[in-house]
Amino acid sequence: MTPDQEPETHLQTRPLHPTLACEITGLALWETPAPETVAALRALWARYGVLVFRRQALSDAEVAAFSAWFGPLERTVRTDWASPNAPEIGVISNLRDGQSRPIGGLGDGEIAWHSDQSYMAHPATGAVLYALELPAEGGHTSWVDLRAAYAGLPDDLKHAIEGRHGIFDYTKRLAGYQEGDRTISEEARRKTPPVSHPLVHTHPITGTKALYLDSTTTVGIAGVDKAAGIALLDEIYRAATQPDNVYTHTWQVGDLLLWDNGFTMHRREPFDSAARRLMKRSTIILDPKRHIVPAGTPADLPAAAA
Ligand code: OGA
Ligand code: MN
């Protein structure tokens, strides 16, 4: 594909997938942007869900400042992953310090399809991940377009989830993590009771319907018995994540990716535990007038059929 010139700015864009993911060139993210640049990026983000910027060289403070172009930053419940340089920045890494303690979260294992803050009643759905050190192989991250996934669902599955709410539980996510990441503080536990969110949302800018899903936290569907809810969700995950809906990113050092968890999920392949991978991360509170931001409520865990 040849680069496209966006009419309103000097931004050059290169779509990386038919509906998801677009590379943007011509921007130094450490510089203060013109308002029209931010407006153009917002429009591209609403359309593509994942924006890719390459060859960036950013401090933690600069990653935070760039992220804040799009909304206030959230300090997540994983305060144990926070950067010592900037509390709004998380460290995603398998590296350890001199005392053999992990310097960040998510280690080197596989991470299944998820949407970052699905377990929060009011998820901060904007995310930035910036690559500083990478393994020679593995550790690729993929995103799935949950608008295309919804559009492609067979009618019976669309009807089955119409008006339904999923139940999202952080306890399930924790159980799937590698050992060091499974333990959280009492405060973090208090902040993460099970919540329910509608399984389908409409994007306020594009008007497109999208699924809202997270295979690492969903434990059922509200008002549906536990086994039937899980079976229905499994069927939806299978249909949603078919390869046509997926963009896989091969990381280069200096890549910064910005994604919207409101209509995408992502997954990561594992990598060699002896290799080094160091990423910096921010989490952005997005405006529901511009983004799909699920508004959840506390939920009871699903019950088995009587
Ligand atoms: C995340 C995440 C994947 C990766 O930071 O939320 O899922 O590739 N990271 O490290
Ligand atoms: Mn994630």
Image (tube, helix red, strand yellow):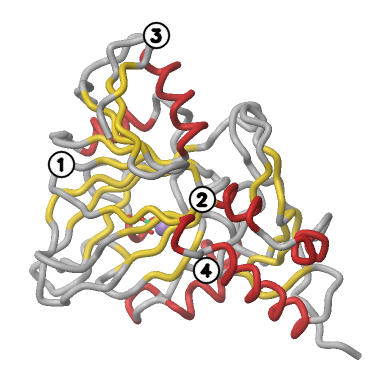
Kindly identify the amino acid type of the residue bearing the numbered disc 2.
Asp
The 10 Å Cα crowd at callout 3, few under 14, some 14 to 19, many 20 or more, is: few
The 10 Å Cα crowd at callout 2, few under 14, some 14 to 19, many 20 or more, is: many
Of circles 4 and 3, the one toward us is 3
Residue 294, placed above or below residue 301: above
Decide which of tag 2 and tag 3 comes sooner along the chain: 3
Q: At 23% across and 62% down in the image, what residue appears?
A: 93
113 or 72, which lies in front?
A: 113
Of circles 1 and 3, the one toward us is 3
Question: How far is mark 4 from mark 1, CA to CA?
Answer: 36 Å
165 or 149, which lies in front?
A: 149
Per the rendering, the mark at residue 145 is: 2
Give how far across and how far down residue 257 sits, in percent: 31, 42
Q: At 10% across and 70% down in the image, what residue appears?
A: 275
Is residue 221 visible from the viewing direction of this image? yes
Give how far across and how far down residue 167 sits, in percent: 70, 66
Check whether the beta carbons of the residues at disc 2 and disc 4 lie within 8 A of each other: no
The residue wearing badge 1 is 254
Residue 197 occupies which quadrant of the picture? bottom right
Question: How far is mark 1 from mark 2, CA to CA?
Answer: 24 Å
Give how far across and how far down residue 199 sits, in percent: 71, 56
Q: At 8% across and 68% down in the image, what residue appears?
A: 98
Secondary structure, mark 3, is loop
The residue wearing badge 3 is 8
Asked if disc 1 is less than 8 Å from ligand 1, the answer is no
Decide which of tag 4 and tag 3 comes sooner along the chain: 3
Give how far across and how far down residue 72 sits, in percent: 47, 31
The quarter of the image that holds ligand 2 is bottom left
Kindly identify the amino acid type of the residue bearing the numbered disc 3.
Glu
Per the rendering, the mark at residue 119 is: none
Q: At 18% across and 56% down in the image, what residue appears?
A: 278
Question: How far is mark 2 from mark 3, CA to CA?
Answer: 26 Å
